[in-house]
Image (spheres, helix red, strand yellow):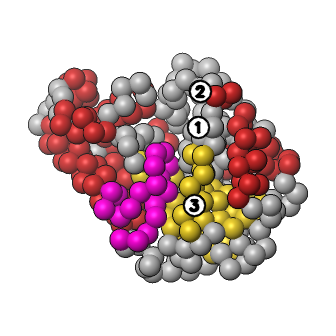
Amino acid sequence: MIRAAIPALLLVGTVTAMAQPAPAPAPAAPDYSKVEEVSTDLGKGLYAITGSGGNTTVAVGSKGLIVVDTQYAPLYDKLRAKITSISPKPILYVVNTHYHADHTSGNAAFHQNNSGVVLVAHPQVLERMRNPAPRPDGSPGAAVPAEALPTAPYSGNGTTLDVGGQTAQLTHPAPAHTDGDTILIFPGADVISTGDIVSSSTYPNIDVAAGGGIDGMIAGTDFVIAHADANTKIVPGHGHVMNKAEVQTYRDMLKTARDRIAKAKAGGMTEDQVAKAGLLADLDKTWLAPGNPLVVRFPINVYRSVK
């Protein structure tokens, strides 16, 4: 079973404005007409849904549903239909694990089409969506509609949501993938939803411009491992559902990459030299996805964030 409960905190709606760095470039949008939403039954009322963009987690309680991450906006109808096939109960909460569009673009449609739904996230998610950063080419960032913004940013290090017999414990770790990450633990179902702190099949994107860093990624992954056992099902931000052993393998990869690149940086290698040196050649065989520019940039992001 999942270990160590997290104290419940009140939901609040205030946030302090902060300056916005430019986000990392994103891969090209998929052909949404060809996307199929596929659900995996995790047991005890929990489901993972894979479509395009970030994975979605659905928790079914006696009063209604919790939906974690909303994928891309054009997929709303497909995603909502898949959720309805799991349970016709109302969606009470939508939780964003961070601000990236592949996890939040569907927010507006969920807000507009599900009466009373509450959009929950860390305050930094609200801030980064409310004040979009310039694109990598310097052009203005895309405005986020008001309906897509979190309506209940939580204070402190976390909060707890309850939908009747199904509890989600939200924890905000130290900056990892971004500075506004949330990890969700569903103790009654022995499920953890990690957002993009964990990826099951490729190197992760570390959004250094948004406060992310390799040390935080390792610490966040350690948190997931510490709260899991051999039976825990772990829904990563991208890829297949994982077990604890698989997350430990992923964590070992992060630590190996960090140590090699930190040593090279301390020895005077430049960012460009590290990017071309093949320091992670053995890891690339398992973790590199050549068609994804965010994954290809992994050594650079580690270099920029390593202390």
* Element assignment for label 3: strand
Whether tag 1 and tag 2 are in contact, CB under 8 A, the answer is yes
Q: Are there few (<14), some (14-19), or many (20+) residues within 10 Å of tag 1?
A: many
Q: Is residue 67 above or below residue 61?
A: above
Location of the N terminus by quadrant is bottom left
Camera-near label (3 vs 2) is 3
Residue 240: in magenta span? yes
Camera-near label (1 vs 3) is 3
- Per the rendering, the mark at residue 41 is 3
From the top left corner, tell me how far across and down residue 202 is, in percent: 37, 40
Residue at x-position 67% and y-position 72%: 161
- Per the rendering, the mark at residue 52 is 1
Tell me the quarter of the picture where residue 277 sits: top left
Residue at x-position 79% and y-position 43%: 109
User: What segment carries the magenta color?
Assistant: 230-247
Q: In this view, does 97 lie above or below 157?
A: above
- Per the rendering, the mark at residue 30 is 2
* Element assignment for label 1: loop
* Element assignment for label 2: loop
Q: Which amino acid does label 3 sit on?
A: Asp
Q: Earlier in the sequence, mark 3 or mark 2?
A: 2
From the top left corner, tell me how far across and down residue 60 is, in percent: 69, 67
Q: What residue type is labelled 1?
A: Ser
Check the image and name the residue furthest to the right: 115
Please tell me which residue lies in front, 144 or 268: 144
From the top left corner, tell me how far across and down residue 105 is, in percent: 68, 40
Q: Distance between the residues labelled 3 and 2?
A: 25 Å
